[in-house]
Image: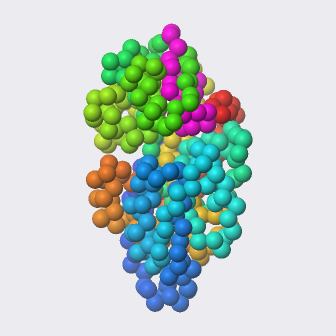
């Protein structure tokens, strides 16, 4: 699928899912009972591949009660951290279709790991039973408010090595830094070993690094407090809560290869936070989960609750998300090579 086609898909996904969700929520209950409900009256594990308290955990815990209501199930959030989300994702990939388990995914990180052939990957993202996309979370580059770089153009033009802080190889932070450097040709050094994104950001504030890349909703608070300045988001669309922040497509690469890599990066970042079930789910069970997801994510109370936490949803249906994921995984050898350098 072309970049333009995927952009159109992203922009129409929200409207499409709302229509589908209203239909799903309005289905005749007697018809559903006749068909049989696999999840109704049962416990459904909702796995978060990170510790409690982060963005993925916030989305899962907000969504769980609404999803449970729509499915008639008891949705139990379980945190399974480890190996940068690979541990839980491998477990979901190896779970049988009879296991009542779903997982929120860091699809940017897991897709990158798969494309790069990283150690520890024991899954194929395209084989999961795809439920949908919960939200987008494109990476945002932030610098110290009093640092030597005050704009992304400063970074592009820098002859001095730009020091990015990151938790470690394979993290979204490391991937964003490596790909941006490859696209625009500025020299970088990625300083690793930080215990988390907050610690990495503190290194930038203290002047021990020049920049840090993290999801826009993670950097929103520090930007509003004036600790850091957001200089670019890896997207072709502005972030609603950071409307003055430039999008990366405002900066045209000098080479054709750079332009192609930029398209690949934007498409990768569009994957955001997905929702999947184990591979091989029978069609009727996947349909049940998708209908429940569309019902839950159209609930105005959930939308308001997440908006209040500055964690908006940006939904794609299961079919739309599966199509987007397949296209991203079928990437160019050049982009795959850049991703390999991030692991």
Q: Is residue 243 left or right of residue 194?
A: left
| Outermost top residue | 159
Question: Residue 64, located in which quarter of the rendered image?
Answer: bottom left
**Magenta region: which residues?**
159-183
What colour-coding does the image apply? rainbow
| Residue 286 visible | yes
User: 219 and 326: which one is in front?
Assistant: 219
| Residue 258 visible | no
Dividing the image into 4 quarters, which one contains the C terminus?
top right
> What residue is drawn where x is 56% and y is 24%?
190
User: 292 and 257: which one is in front?
Assistant: 292
Question: Residue 108, located in which quarter of the rendered image?
Answer: top right
Q: Position of residue 257 (x, y in %)?
A: 61, 25
> What residue is drawn where x is 44% and y is 48%?
54
Q: Position of residue 18 (x, y in %)?
A: 38, 64
In reply to whether residue 245 is colored magenta, the answer given is no
User: 241 and 229: which one is in front?
Assistant: 229
Q: Position of residue 35 (x, y in %)?
A: 55, 86
80 lies above or below 112: below
212 lies above or below 155: below
Q: Position of residue 130 (x, y in %)?
A: 58, 61
């Amino acid at each position: 699928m072309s970049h333009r086609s995927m952009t159109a898909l992203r922009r129409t996904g929200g409207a499409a899912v709302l229509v589908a969700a209203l239909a799903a929520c309005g289905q005749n209950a007697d018809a559903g009972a006749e068909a049989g409900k696999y999840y109704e009256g049962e416990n459904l594990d909702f796995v978060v591949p990170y510790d409690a308290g982060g963005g993925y955990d916030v989305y899962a815990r907000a969504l769980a009660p609404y999803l449970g209501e729509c499915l008639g199930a008891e949705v139990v959030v379980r945190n399974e951290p480890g190996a940068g989300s690979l541990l839980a994702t491998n477990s979901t990939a190896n779970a049988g279709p009879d296991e009542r388990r779903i997982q929120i995914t860091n699809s940017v990180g897991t897709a990158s790991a798969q494309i790069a052939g990283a150690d520890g990957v024991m899954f194929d993202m395209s084989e999961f039973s795809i439920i949908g996309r919960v939200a987008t979370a494109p990476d945002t580059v932030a610098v110290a408010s009093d640092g030597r770089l005050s704009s992304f153009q400063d970074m592009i033009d820098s002859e001095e090595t730009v020091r990015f802080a990151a938790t470690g190889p394979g993290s979204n932070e490391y991937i964003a830094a490596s790909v941006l450097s490859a696209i625009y040709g500025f020299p970088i050094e990625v300083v690793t070993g930080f215990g988390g994104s907050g610690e990495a950001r503190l290194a930038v504030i203290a002047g021990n690094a020049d920049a840090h890349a993290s999801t826009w909703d993670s950097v929103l608070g520090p930007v509003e407090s004036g600790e850091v300045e957001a200089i670019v988001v890896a997207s072709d669309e502005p972030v609603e809560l950071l409307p003055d922040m430039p999008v990366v497509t405002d900066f045209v690469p000098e080479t054709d290869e750079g332009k192609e890599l930029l398209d690949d990066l934007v498409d990768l970042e569009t994957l955001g936070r997905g929702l999947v079930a184990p591979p091989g789910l029978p069609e009727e069970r996947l349909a049940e989960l998708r209908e429940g997801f569309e019902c839950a994510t159209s609930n105005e109370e959930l939308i308001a609750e997440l908006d209040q936490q500055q964690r908006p949803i940006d939904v794609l249906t299961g079919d739309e998300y599966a199509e987007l994921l397949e296209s991203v995984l079928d990437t160019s050898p050049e982009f795959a090579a850049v991703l390999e350098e991030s692991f």
